[in-house]
Image (tube, rainbow, N blue to C red):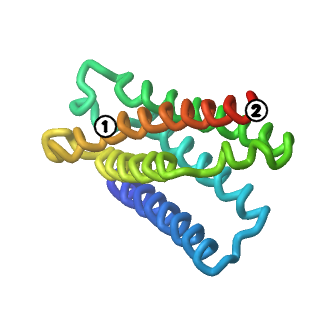
């Protein structure tokens, strides 16, 4: 498969997965069709999709001209995002084992939704430009990297917010 076709297919699959993930959650809430299994599986699928995409981008990043002398440019936010997701998965699992008193502290909030939106947008941009030189994409490539850093910042910030909520519940 040629490189541009592969990039187009990868980006298309990622966009379809992101849209169907959002639509599934929206319809489940709107029509009150949520299930315990869906509530468990959806975040796992999201984290797998994001982590796999981040690993792909770190192993086959956009053209070297974009990253210049900084090959680690995508690795730093990727580590922050994946580390946060693993930590939150463990915390949510632990909170579930502790009963209902902690469930509110780890419930999804608007900060998490913004994190997800910036992640999906940045990853879509970075996937789409992977086989294009930076001079061809210019500000689009820069915005993809910048949004990845914003999403990493939101990921770490939301982790601290969750941990603060949990500590307040535990101190009661």
Total residue callouts: 2
User: Based on the displayed image, in which of its 4 quarters is residue 32 positioned?
Assistant: bottom right
* Most distant residue in the front direction: 172
Q: Is residue 77 left or right of residue 137?
A: right
Q: Is residue 171 left or right of residue 47?
A: right
Labels 1 and 2: the sequence-earlier one: 1
How packed mark 1 is, by other alpha carbons closer than 10 Å (few <14, some 14-19, many 20 or more), is: many
Where 39 falls versus 33 (above or below)? above
The residue lying at 32 percent from left, 50 percent from top is 125
The residue lying at 64 percent from left, 52 percent from top is 43
* Quadrant location, the N terminus: bottom left
Where 81 falls versus 6 (above or below)? above
User: Based on the displayed image, in which of its 4 quarters is residue 9 positioned?
Assistant: bottom left
* Quadrant location, the C terminus: top right
Q: Position of residue 22 (x, y in %)?
A: 52, 65
* C-alpha span from label 1 to label 2: 41 Å
Q: Position of residue 106 (x, y in %)?
A: 66, 44
Q: Position of residue 33 (x, y in %)?
A: 70, 76
| Residue that carries the numbered disc 2 in the rendered image | 172
The residue lying at 51 percent from left, 47 percent from top is 112
| Residue that carries the numbered disc 1 in the rendered image | 145
Q: Position of residue 87 (x, y in %)?
A: 65, 32
Q: Closer to us: mark 1 or mark 2? A: 2
Label 1 secondary element: helix
Q: Nearer the viewer, residue 4 or 120?
A: 120
């Amino acid at each position: 498969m040629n490189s541009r076709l592969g990039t187009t297919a990868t980006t298309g699959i990622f966009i379809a997965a992101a849209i169907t993930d959002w639509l599934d959650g929206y319809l489940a809430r709107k029509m009150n069709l949520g299930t315990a299994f869906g509530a468990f599986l959806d975040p796992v699928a999201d984290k797998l999709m994001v982590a796999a995409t981040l690993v792909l981008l770190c192993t086959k990043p956009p053209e070297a001209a974009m990253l210049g002398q900084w090959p680690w440019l995508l690795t730093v936010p990727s580590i922050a995002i994946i580390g946060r997701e693993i930590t939150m998965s463990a915390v949510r699992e632990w909170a579930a084992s502790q009963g209902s008193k902690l469930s509110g502290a780890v419930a999804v909030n608007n900060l998490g939704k913004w994190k997800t939106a910036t992640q999906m947008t940045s990853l879509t941009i970075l996937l789409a430009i992977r086989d294009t030189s930076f001079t061809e994409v210019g500000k689009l490539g820069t915005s993809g990297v910048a949004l990845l850093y914003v999403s990493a910042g939101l990921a770490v910030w939301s982790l601290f917010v969750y941990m603060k909520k949990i500590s307040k519940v535990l101190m009661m």
